[in-house]
Amino acid sequence: MTKLPADLPENWKQGQTVSPNGTEVGLTEQHGYNYLMKQVNATQKEVNGIQDALPDVAKQTTVAEINQKIGTEGDADTQPTVFGRVAQVKNAMGEKLAELLTKATGMDGKIGTSADDKNADSIFGKMAAIKKDVESGVVYVPSDNIRKTIISREVSDTGKNYSMTFLGYFYAKRTGFVKLTASTKSTSGNIYIDGRHGGVDRDMRLPYFGKGRNKMLQVSDVIETNESTRWNFSTILTGKHSTTFIKAQAILPVQKDTLYLFAMRADGSGNVAMCNNFTISYDEVDGDSL
């Protein structure tokens, strides 16, 4: 039997995102859902391979001994039988999958169900909205063509608890997906770029903040605790700790005629996060051609 790698990650942290390959959200390949399913399939193949090997075993032992090694379907995972090993594998994979789903905060809610409509805050909801717009024309698709530069100078966040530093905004004229690319570094921890959408009002202005709500957001403005909570930002891109600027990327689903705001925060008090470039890249294509 081929030795399985047993290298599924056990160091998930609050707020990390599950993705198909892991690397789209700044994690390793082992964090990806596809990698997990690959290991499940490999385990099943190894179990199936046991039956293929039984004819050779039969040449060296009796039927009774073979049956004893196979065991029965009710064997516990502690039994030294084929069914015991299958039970052991099933239990181990079940525990790891349950642990993964638990640590990936709110994953079930984020995925939603196929019955979700275009207004639901879930992946299926966003797919429904995109499908509706695809049926009526042009959509955004991720590419390397930079269509908007949010910032091109160094901006920093001091890591004050629950505060964020405003980076800029993007107004989506189409529905689809865009690629976010950020160049970041930090003194000690991760860097999080959070986003929120501002509704579907084509003429919507940037929000006001501060005492009396009398100041419009500008690049480098600090959004304090009560403001960040009120606006309900969520993490859309994570930059790993590095003392030199490195790139991090993420794919963001967007909806037509919607304003998206972006802000940066540091991982924990005392960490200083910096970003010196943040861009949005996409192409416009006819939805019927996809």
Image (cartoon, rainbow, N blue to C red):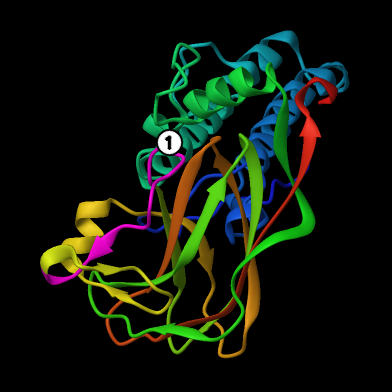
Residue furthest left in the image: 212
Pick the residue in front: 140 or 80.
140
Q: Residue at x 47, y 66 (%)?
A: 168
The image quadrant that residue 23 belongs to is bottom right
Residue 98 spot, x, y in % from top left:
41, 35
Q: Secondary structure at mark 1?
A: loop
Q: Which residues are magenta?
A: 198-211
Pick the residue in front: 136 or 279.
136
Q: Residue at x 34, y 54 (%)?
A: 233
**In terms of secondary structure, what is the magenta stretch mainly?**
loop
Residue 102 can be seen, yes or no: yes
Determine whether, in the image, residue 125 is placed left or right of residue 227: right
Query: Mark 1: few, some, or many residues within 10 Å (few <14, many ≥20)?
Result: some
The answer to whether residue 87 is above or below residue 175 is above
Point out the image quarter for the N terminus.
Answer: top right
The image quadrant that residue 61 belongs to is top right
Point out the image quarter for the C terminus.
Answer: top right
Pick the residue in front: 7 or 49.
7
Q: Is residue 203 part of the magenta span, yes or no?
A: yes
Name the residue tied to disc 1.
200
Residue 16 spot, x, y in % from top left:
44, 54
Q: Is residue 242 part of the magenta span, yes or no?
A: no
Q: Amino acid at mark 1?
A: Val
Q: Residue at x 26, y 72 (%)?
A: 163
Q: Residue at x 11, y 66 (%)?
A: 212
Residue 224 spot, x, y in % from top left:
21, 71
